[in-house]
Image: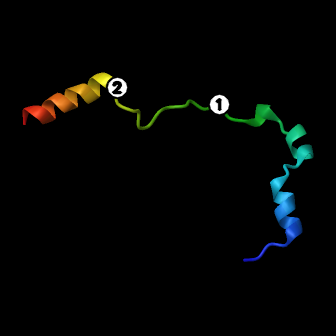
Amino acid sequence: ISLSPLTAIMSDKPNMREISSFDKTKLKKTETRVKNPLPTKETIDEERKREQSH
């Protein structure tokens, strides 16, 4: 798929009219949750001790 140079240039620049007229009140409230949290230092230490004891 080849893009014309004009298309490539236009996609690099945001449409400022759309940004300035965007209505934030239409956004839905969401709750952010970590799906896969990183292990704590304590958890890592416990796993290392278990591995060494086997």
Quarter occupied by the C terminus? top left
Hey, which quadrant is residue 18 in on the image? top right
Mark 2–mark 1 CB contact (< 8 Å): no
Q: In this image, 51 relative to 33: left or right?
A: left
State the mark number for residue 20.
none
Regarding residue 41, the answer to whether it shows in the image is yes
Determine the residue positioned at 85% across, 72% down: 4
- The picture places residue 38, in percent across and down from the top left corner, at 39, 33
Confirm whether residue 21 shows in the render: no
6 over 36 or under it: above or below: below
Q: Nearer the viewer, residue 54 or 7?
A: 54
In percent of width and height, residue 48 lies at: 20, 31
- Mark 2 highlights which residue? 40
Q: Quadrant of the N terminus?
A: bottom right
Q: Which mark is residue 29?
A: 1
For residue 40, what is the image quadrant? top left
Q: Amino acid at mark 1?
A: Lys
| x then y, percent, for residue 2 | 76, 76
Residue drawn at x 60%, y 32% is 30
> Which is nearer the eye, 20 or 14?
14
**Is 16 on the left or on the right of 30, as rendered?**
right
Extreme residue toward the top, this view? 42
Amino acid at pointer 2? Thr
Q: Is residue 25 above or below residue 16?
A: above
In the rendered picture of this protein, how many numbered marks are placed on residues?
A: 2
Q: Residue furthest right?
A: 17
Q: CA gap, disc 2 to disc 1?
A: 29 Å
Q: Nearer the viewer, mark 2 or mark 1?
A: 2
In the drawing, does residue 51 fall left or right of residue 27? left
Residue 19: quarter of image? top right
Give coordinates of residue 29: x percent, y percent. 65, 30
